[in-house]
Amino acid sequence: MNTSLDNAAGWLRQQHDTMLEQLVALAEMNSHSENVAGLLQVAESLRIMFDTLGVPCRTQDLLPRHVISDAGEVYEKPTGPALLWHQRPHCSRRVLLAIHYDTVYPIDHPFQKCTWMDQGRLRGPGVADAKGGIIVMLWALHAAEKFGLLPKLGWTVVLNPDEEIGSPCSWPLWRTIASAYTFGLLMEPALPDGSIVNKRKGSGTFTLVMRGKAAHSGRNFREGRNAVLKLAELALEMHRWNELDPGIIVNVGKMVGGQAANVVPDVATLRVNIRIEDFSQQEQILSRLNRLVQTYNNSEGFNCSVTGCFHAPPKLVCPKTERLMKFIEIAAAQQGQGVRFAATGGASDGNKLAAVGLPNIDTLGPSGDRLHSPDEWVDTKSLVENSERLLRLLVLLQDSAE
């Protein structure tokens, strides 16, 4: 029996009110992915919050991302910093713990405050996705360090500001650091019933720009080339891809074009999200997309271009991931609980880390639901429960044989 671990778990169970207070404060600070001032404010609050670990924080500025405007022009957008904490980096066994601190709710969105839905469910922006995960991780590490449970395990925490928009600025960071760790543990929310995700679809976001020719609708209508109509034809073709393979999802998400009603529009943009189950589907879609663009490019006076990529490759279950799943089952059993694993169509930074060779489980945060909606909620009792499970998992990873 590990008395120190049991003592740490007992201490952790006494921290519920503090954890909840921190979560509400964090959730009510707006950190929408486009709100750089809010991201900086939350980053500073997180730096102070994590001071309890006694580990120095390193702030890493990230390069801006390139964005295509609705007019088809490319420009740069800045983001907030990544925050990193390294503990015992010279240990032979190291674990990466990570989660994002941005959310999907703009600063002018009406959903900015936390309220209770019932005794056990707190409603609020980012309470599950993923500020609750930050709290779960912080307190598991706090207990581990307070009780000296991980002398042979090195860990790194990374909090990034851009996951909700596909981590375009964090992607180079993941590629750089992933090889230094044995496992990755990410704090995305567990499913509403507590299930943990082990397999995810890949996700790609693409922007297509159609350029035609402007003309006065009365004087020289037939000389114009209507970019909106031409791009609408292309969008319908892409939508029909949903009928070809049930494992592929093509979401025509946003189309913008045109100015005044009496002007033939000369430019239109289309933003599409595509989900795939495996790498063969990814290659199939990329090939199909390139052929489609070529068909519409230089067609009857039009020019078509596409930018984007599969920013989150499919996340599959490999033998090392199965081993990590076994450790999670053991940690849960120590609490007298079971664990269910499930697949999902959503994507996360876990997809990226798996793609660069780091086996990971990415839903070790609290349980919750209605993500990305004004009804997002978190199961508050899972804050402590899942923090304790994470603590026990870290001890198991330290003590396991290579």
Image (tube, rainbow, N blue to C red):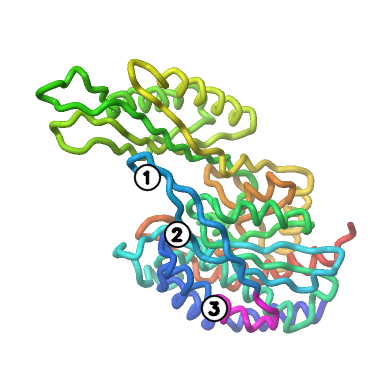
Point out the image quarter for the N terminus. bottom right
- Whether residues under marks 3 and 1 lie with C-beta atoms below 8 angstroms apart, the answer is no
Q: Residue at 82%, 66% (x, y): give it.
A: 398
**Quarter placement of the C terminus:** bottom right
Q: What's the CA distance linking mark 2 and mark 1?
A: 17 Å
Q: Main secondary structure of the magenta part?
A: helix
Q: Nearer the viewer, mark 2 or mark 3?
A: 2
- State the residue lying farthest toward the top: 300
Q: Residue at x 55, y 75 (%)?
A: 46
Residue on which the image places disc 2: 33
Q: Magenta span has 51?
A: yes
Question: How far, Cα to Cα, is label 2 from label 3?
Answer: 24 Å
Secondary structure at badge 3 equals: helix
Q: Position of residue 389 (x, y in %)?
A: 68, 67
Q: Which mark is residue 69?
A: 1
Left/right of residue 213 with respect to residue 387 in the rendered view: left
Q: Residues within 10 Å of mark 2 (few under 14, many from 20)?
A: many
Return the residue nearer the eye: 70 or 276.
70
Q: Which mark is residue 19?
A: 3
Seen from this angle, which residue lies furthest right?
401
| Span of residues in magenta | 46-57
Tell me the amino acid under the disc marked 1.
Ser
Q: Residues within 10 Å of mark 3 (few under 14, many from 20)?
A: some
Q: Is residue 87 above or below residue 361?
A: below
Of the residues shown, which amino acid type is indicated by label 2? Ser
Among the two numbered marks 3 and 1 on one chain, the one whose residue lies closer to the N terminus? 3
